[in-house]
Image (spheres, coloured by chain):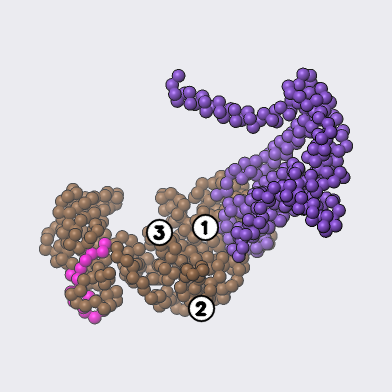
Chain colours: A brown, B purple
Amino acid sequence: MPAEPRFSAPARVADGTNGSAHAAVALTGVTKQFGKITALDAVSLFVRHGELMTLLGPSGCGKTTLLHLVAGFLIPESGEIAIDGQRITDVPAYRREIGIMFQNYALFPHMSVAGNVGYGLRMRRIARPEIDRRIADALALVKLAGLEERRPRQLSGGQQQRVALARALVIRPKVLLLDEPFSALDRNLRASMQVELKEIQRKLGVTTIFVTHDQSEALSLSDRIAVIADGRIRQLNTPHEVYRHPSDRFVASFIGDANVLRAHLERIEGAVASVALGAARVTVPMRTLEGSAVGSAVDLFVRPEDLRVAETDAAAAAHGTIAAQIYQGGHIDLYVDAPEVSSGRVLLRVPSHEAASLRPAGTRIAIALAADVAIAFRSA
Amino acid sequence: MPLPKLLRLLGGATVTAILGFILLPALVVTLAAFNSRAILSFPPESWSWRWFVKAIAYDDFQAGVRNGLIVTAWASSIALVVGAAFAFALDRYEFRLKRTLETILLSPLVVPHFTIGLGFLILAAQLGFARGYSVIVACHVVLVLPFVLRSVYISLRNLDPRLELAAASLGASPGRVLITVTLPLLLPGLVSGWLFAAILSFNEFTASLFVTVQRTQTLPVALYNYVREYADPSMAAISVMYIVATATVLTLANAFLGLAKVLNVEHAR
């Protein structure tokens, strides 16, 4: 993958709602610096009521900093933060009414499960009977009833996570913040906890900001995804839009698998262009190709599932030699050496019921495009 | 005999020798304490409790224990508060001369005790202080501060800052975070720091020799004064009682707090 060009801060893509007044959480032009390093650069972000917004990006991109700014653990150098229309930029964390769940859950080791869950209620000086009732409700919500007296270290990872979630939700926070909550769980548990979290979030309708570096997690859980890199929001949209219509090269390569294929620009027709790859033609938006002339080389981004093995040479986009076949259950990943279009290996993802038609490693195949719409960027 | 087996035997013998070497002095003194004869000798020829009775009844030793406990209680408690405050500052804040401050606070580890004792003696004389408890306590605070500081500092390093952030997010003001989360989790470190300080202070001899007078002499100083004149086994009897007392304190600490935790053997995540 070629080096990533820098893009100017696309403030307009971040403004996906109808204004800050209606947003559950509104960040306007927020900048945060650590010494000489700018962690967030004039970021504006509006989170709608009840939505699950994911902050997705590589480590060090500023997503956790953004979460900590909303939580009140950090104060921005400039810009404003509001929750429910109230400016809270310099309000300390303990007066913000937010719930947070950390990657390691941060359960108080010297308190029981009930002690942990009831902590926020005790801090609010709520009457004992109501505390007990709300602890019971919260533990029932996360399916942990009966474990009130256990200590955190006596619980499994999944149970600890449920306690952390109950502790954050029991105070009825205005915003729920999740900091990479699933990364410490094993694969099977992670999937079931993700489903459960999504159900609870929808049931309670709590506005949620979720930080992750795992793009598949972001795609499966989010109402909207904010893709962050180098302290800026690169794209803010639904998972489908971000996956299918990435706004720039970084987003295209960070979300999902993508093949970068050498093609050339054949024709420009207003807002769209036709790109030629071998005998195949594909339509791409011109938006990401500004300044490219007809005939110039472009990088065509194609998802692995949009490639298939061609039956005939007539529509072949490229030819290559199968280097490896990897059986994944529902599908098969085919790695193909196709030096005419890519210096790396081209990945084809084909349904495994087509496995019968596949050939062993070493066979030459023709690759065809299964989609007639894709996205292309100027050659870097 | 094959070589590996020989090496293993040699290794075992070496470890046994080292362990014996560590335990031998205490063992010799213990046996000497039960010697019925009036000279410090080893091995004893006949057995008796009489040196214990004599040691307990001896006025200077009684006063020494009392003085020592007073000095120890004050010195280790003051050192705990001061050391914990400095540990917090060193752990939580970035400021100019941080390294210098740390070096100064830990310097009693490298400055000889007699230098510190002599320094306090000269200071007290210059400032016209009577050589009462306050000078001894001040001197001991300086001597044990590095140990408290290290102990609390290590506990703070092991404390996950996210616990405090979580508490704050749940509505706890900084003061309540301190009382409900930080201090309870630091308790093992605080107790271990205090215990170390107390044991060191109670044992301290070199500096104490300079800053105590007859009226305020602590147990080690009283023992020194005694041994200059007599050489009977009451010294050994005192030693045995001292070992038993310390072991009892540590056993109790273990029972109530878990010695592993108190001594920071078990690291927090």
- Which of the two labelled residues, at mark 2 and mark 1, occupies the earlier sequence position? 2
Identify the subunit bearing mark 1: A
- Residue nearest the viewer, comparing A118 with A364: A364
- The residues bearing labels 2 and 1 have C-alpha atoms spaced at a distance of 29 Å
Identify the subunit bearing mark 3: A
Q: Is residue A266 magenta?
A: yes
Residue at 69% across / 54% down in the picture?
B83
Residue at 49% across / 76% down in the picture?
A28
Q: Label 3 near label 1: C-beta < 8 Å?
A: no
> Which amino acid type is marked by label 3?
Asp
- The residues bearing labels 2 and 3 have C-alpha atoms spaced at a distance of 31 Å
Q: Which residue bears the numbered disc 1? A: A102
> Which amino acid type is marked by label 1?
Phe
Residue B171 picture location, percent across and down = 62, 63
Residue A21: image tag: 2
Magenta residue span: A259-276
> Closer to us: mark 2 or mark 1?
1
- The residues bearing labels 1 and 3 have C-alpha atoms spaced at a distance of 16 Å
Q: Which residue bears the numbered disc 3? A: A214
